[in-house]
Amino acid sequence: MLREKSFVNFKDIISQLETSKESRINFYFVTEEQNQEIYALLVHVMGYMDKLYLVEVIFTVLKELLMNANKANAKRDYFSREKLDIQNSTDYAKGMSRFQENIIMKWNEQLDRLDGGNYYISLLMKVDGKSIHFAVENNAPITKEELARVNRRIEVAKNYNDLSDAFTDVSDSTESAGLGLVLIQLLLKNSGIGSDKFKIFTNDKITRATLTVPDVTTPVEIQTGLKTKLLNEIDGLPPLPHSLTKIIQLCNNPDSDLHMISNEIERNPALSADLLKLSNSAFFANRSQVSSILQAVKVVGLKNLRNLLYVSGVRKIMDGQYGKMMDVWEHSSRCSYYARYLATENNHTNKIADIIAVCALLHDIGKFLLLSVDRGFFKKIETYQRGADSGNSTLLEEMAIGLSHPQLGALLAEKWEFPPDLRVAIEYHHKPFLAPPELRDLVEVIYMANMMADYHEQKKGFYAIDKNLLAKFNLDNIDVFSAAVNKVEVLYKKTNE
Ligand SMILES: [Fe+2]
Ligand SMILES: [Fe+2]
């Protein structure tokens, strides 16, 4: 049984899977840190299976099952310490009445209690042709009451079509079988894996939940009223202002000269101000003060200029339609600063620094729509994601709405004819491993900058971040990571003073 730092040897596991051997990872108690490793492992395993698009779904299901196993083991351990018989219904009621207070409220102590004890949890994986089997096993047989409760939840879940149904019907929160099982059913149904591929088995020694991912999965298209509303909203948005698209075209045309472009910009005071601000920003430091538009265009370059035009166009439309959503803009401008910092630190300067600031500024444009169409509902999803699951995925949005904010952002990018790199950065900023390989470096920087910004804004914990990417940026240690965030935040604050 393992508790040490890096517990998973990816290479060993992949080679076991290649030979169709069962791989087994054992735990006494699954920590957040280990969940982070499991996510990184799944990126490798599902990549090997050519099923990367299912990483988020599988991870969410396994994480839920591992959490349930943690709780089940902690419960047995508690009952035996209190000398209560879990099979006896009077004892069961007695134990459960104090479970919340003594175990759930003291969750951080459970690792030390269970470490080296009688209870274990295993994560099993086995490849069978083109399908893959997962199982979560623990040596606490499920009781009749528990099994009945689980089955009740599963029955209820069958009637839900999307997560908004489930949100309005979560009452059973005292035990592990809360929203979790409902969520699993919905995820399996909607991802096309099929809810019949999930089974719970128990005998007098163990409980084992199994999930088989078949070779072929056909995702269900989720239809919700909210989705229709959002799509209509996009249709109704105006095109980018003509004054801006005109300059964008000039920038894209190799024959146009800088004087022509500068003259065009000078007709637009707001744009002129933004451009001067950008050209004098820390990113283009070590130059003398820029005061003319022509000089500014030379300093930032045509690519940056063109990108700035997209930002000012989007800003104008969004502010006009939805009022100033300062929380989103504040987050975006922080993210943009962090992204430029990361790009410089990692020597991406020449290749992608030109576009990175804008990609980061616009990465969450889909959120404007979600917030404006149903702010309350979106906030509810955000809160749930923060509480019960510290993951960074947009699965809940996909399940509850049928569209996530990156997908909405990509639709806007199409509508306004953004260049492909900008569209890809928006679409994949939560799933960089799915981005086209030639743009992956760019998307990874946006992903990491966003995670760092979320971490600073206390929306994400360190263990919710993809460990493979943390390692790539040399940030795969919580102290190093948090020091880096603090450092860049201080620099960011200075530029805003
Ligand atoms: Fe986002
Ligand atoms: Fe974001």
Image: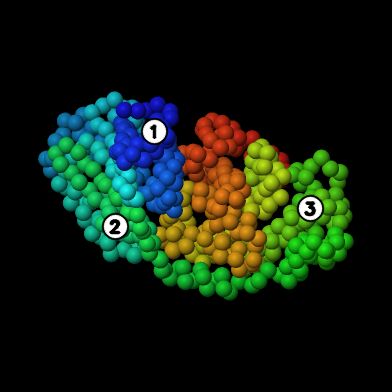
Q: Can you say whether 19 is above or below 256 in the image?
A: above
Relative depth, front residue between 4 and 290: 4
Kindly tell me whether mark 1's CB lies below 8 Å from ligand 1: no
Label 1 to label 3, Cα distance in Å? 48 Å
Q: Can you say whether 255 is above or below 478 in the image?
A: below
Dot 3: element? helix
Between discs 3 and 2, the one toward the N terminus: 2
Q: Residue shown at 47%/71% (left/top)?
A: 228
Residue 103 lies left or right of residue 325; in this view the side is left
Image disc number at residue 72: none
Coloring applied to the structure:
rainbow
Residue 24, picture quadrant: top left
Q: Name the residue under label 2.
A: 195
- Amino acid type at mark 1: Asp
Residue 287, picture quadrant: top right
Q: Name the spot of residue 14 as percent of width and height, x first.
A: 39, 38
Q: Mark 1 points at which residue?
A: 12
- Amino acid type at mark 3: Gly
Q: Residue shown at 64%/72% (left/top)?
A: 238
State yes or no: discs 3 and 2 in contact (Cβ < 8 Å): no
Dot 2: element? helix
Dot 1: element? helix
Q: Mark 3 points at which residue?
A: 301
Q: Can residue 387 be seen in this view?
A: no
State yes or no: discs 2 and 1 in contact (Cβ < 8 Å): no
Image quadrant holding the N terminus, namely top left
- Which one is closest to the eye, mark 1 or mark 3? 1
Disc 3: CA contacts within 10 A as few (<14), some (14-19) or many (>=20): some
Relative depth, front residue between 158 and 76: 158
Q: Residue shown at 42%/34% (left/top)?
A: 11
